[in-house]
Amino acid sequence: MVYKRLSDCADYRNERTASIDFETYITTDNMLPNRGGITTSESLPDAKTVCKYLQRDILLSNIRPYFKKIWLANRNGGCSNDVLVLTAKEPFSPEFLYYVLSDNNFFNYDTVTSKGTKMPRGTPSAIMKYLVPDYGPEKQSGIVSILSAYDNLIETNNKRIKVLEQMAENLYKEWFVHFRFPRYETAELENGIPKGFTLCHLSDFLSFGSGKPKPSEGSLFPVYGGNGIADWCNKHNSENIIIIGRVGAYSGSVYYEPEKCWISDNALYAKRITDDIDSIYYDFYLLRSLKLNKFQGGTGQPLVTQGMLSKIKVYLPTVELIEKYCKFVKPIFTEINKLNQQKVNLAKQRDLLLPRLMSGKLEV
């Protein structure tokens, strides 16, 4: 097996751009852990120019490399200084190098050679010394073809999940924002609010709690932090729970996890005070609709607290209407859970194949 240093296969892009918008701006905050790609940025920088990236460049988060944040750009845009931008050199294809750098072997190397303890940063010079298999274009293409087939299936599931989530959210808005629930035509209104809806604090029907520091490494249960799944561990402290980002750029973001998971100290959780009502889907979209980042405080960085959440007032529908809504959307969430499990299985298969293909143990 012949190897080349990454510096022989790629360069860092050091150009700047003044073209900055929410759809194309990338930071470590809107890069998803565990090779999850990106989400839309929730803020823009004050700087007039940022680092430039082009379609098919490889973007690599340079903070806490063990989060495995990497993205093969499908558009042009700009990114923060904490994101490294690599552009491939001939005859290496960007897609092949993306999979080389998606391997756990690379992230382990990046972590070992990083600097700092509380917030370790990758070392750009050390990254460029990473060894890349010196395969010809035909073998590169074969490896990419195999691995991208898994990623394409995962992306198809992501699109289906997004459509299903939108269906459930639209129904929530129709019933509880626009008040067009079943038989709304005959409902009596008081000051524009349907009779039976009660004004109350969130704390009247929801309890909020804080997560705990992640106990250990592993790969069984997702760990939820301030910006969604941040890592994995081999213990869980909850399931079928609503999680709220507590601190950072994604504080106030709301997630629902039906399976066992660990809620870290960067997140809060919400659950019904009583178990006599099946309301998890209603509660989830209620909290999402409130745009909780509007209620955040903190000076150094955004912060959402249990006290802030408890004071928020909402109009709570009748138990019968909440349960009827949950009954409607439960099949939707059942399908979402199936698609998510398929994604997990596909990712596991891809990640098992990746090092074997790169090492040559598995022929293309």
Image: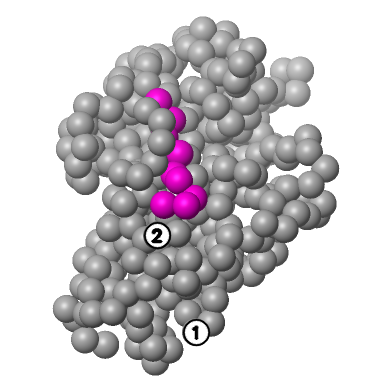
Residue 201: x and y in percent read: 55, 11
Q: Could you tell me if residue 68 is visible in this image? A: yes
> Vertically, is 309 above or below 259?
above
Q: Which residues are magenta?
A: 118-126
> Vertically, is 18 above or below 100?
above
Residue 286: x and y in percent read: 54, 30
The residue sitting at 23% across, 74% down in the picture is 359
Q: Which residue is mark 2?
A: 129
| Prevailing secondary structure of the magenta residues | loop
Using a 10 Å C-alpha cutoff, classify the residue at mark 2 as few (fewer than 14 neighbours), some (14 to 19) or many (20 or more): few
The residue sitting at 49% across, 50% down in the picture is 124
Residue depth check, mark 2 versus mark 1: number of the one nearer the observer? 2
Q: Which residue is most to the bottom?
A: 138
Using a 10 Å C-alpha cutoff, classify the residue at mark 1 as few (fewer than 14 neighbours), some (14 to 19) or many (20 or more): few
The residue sitting at 32% across, 61% down in the picture is 103
Most foreground residue, 28 or 131: 131
Circle 2/circle 1 CB separation < 8 Å: no
The residue sitting at 67% across, 23% down in the picture is 294
Mark 1 element type: loop
For the residues marked 2 and 1, what is the alpha-carbon distance in whole angstroms? 18 Å
Q: Could you tell me if residue 272 is visible in this image? A: no
Give amino acid for label 1: Pro
Q: Residue 268 is drawn in which quadrant?
A: top left
Most foreground residue, 344 or 242: 344
Task: Please give left or right for residue 342 compared with residue 141 in the image.
Answer: left
Query: Which coloring applies here?
Result: one colour
Q: Is residue 309 magenta?
A: no
Q: Indicate which disc residue 91 carries.
A: 1
